[in-house]
Amino acid sequence: MQYSTDIRDAQNDQIESSVGVSPTLTVFDGAAPANCAAADTGTVLAIGTLPADWMAASAAGVKGKSGAWTLTGQAGAGAGTAGTHFRIHSGSRWRGVHAGCDG
């Protein structure tokens, strides 16, 4: 199935709207959880609060980050440990999981 640019832009913009302002980004190592409802897996490598407006408006079907995304490395993460997945969440509800993030 292929979507028009207008539909892709609307879908992309809905991500930021659904998650909300200033969500938390957490980067982990190890295997990614099976799905968004599954418990965290791996070691927490870094955590940061994203800006209130954390994504740019989607254009031509592409959405980029907005503002400064600053993460703090966590004790026990180890030097040079590569992240394998992340979660972006608002409050206590997880909103996304992605495997293959390079941290």
Image (cartoon, rainbow, N blue to C red):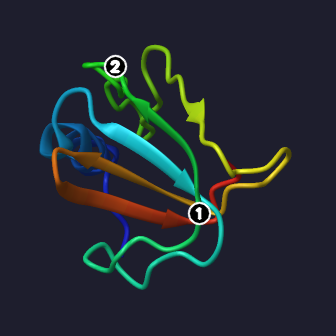
Residue 25 marker: none
| Residue depicted at x 34% and y 19% | 51
- Which image quarter: residue 101? bottom right
The crowd level at tag 1 (other Cα within 10 Å; few <14, some 14-19, many 20+) is some
Pointer 2: what residue? Answer: 51
**Front position in the image: 15 or 41:** 41
Farthest residue, direction right:
80
Q: Is residue 58 left or right of residue 33?
A: left
Q: Is residue 71 left or right of residue 50?
A: right
Give the CA distance from mark 2 to mark 1.
24 Å
Picture coordinates of residue 49 (x, y %)? 37, 29
Picture coordinates of residue 89 (x, y %)? 27, 49
Say which label, 2 or 1, has the lower sequence index: 1
- Which image quarter: residue 71? top right
**Front position in the image: 58 or 70:** 70
Which mark's residue is nearer the viewer, 2 or 1?
1
Pointer 1: what residue? Answer: 43
Type of amino acid under label 1: Thr
| Residue depicted at x 34% and y 25% | 54
Label 2's element?
A: loop
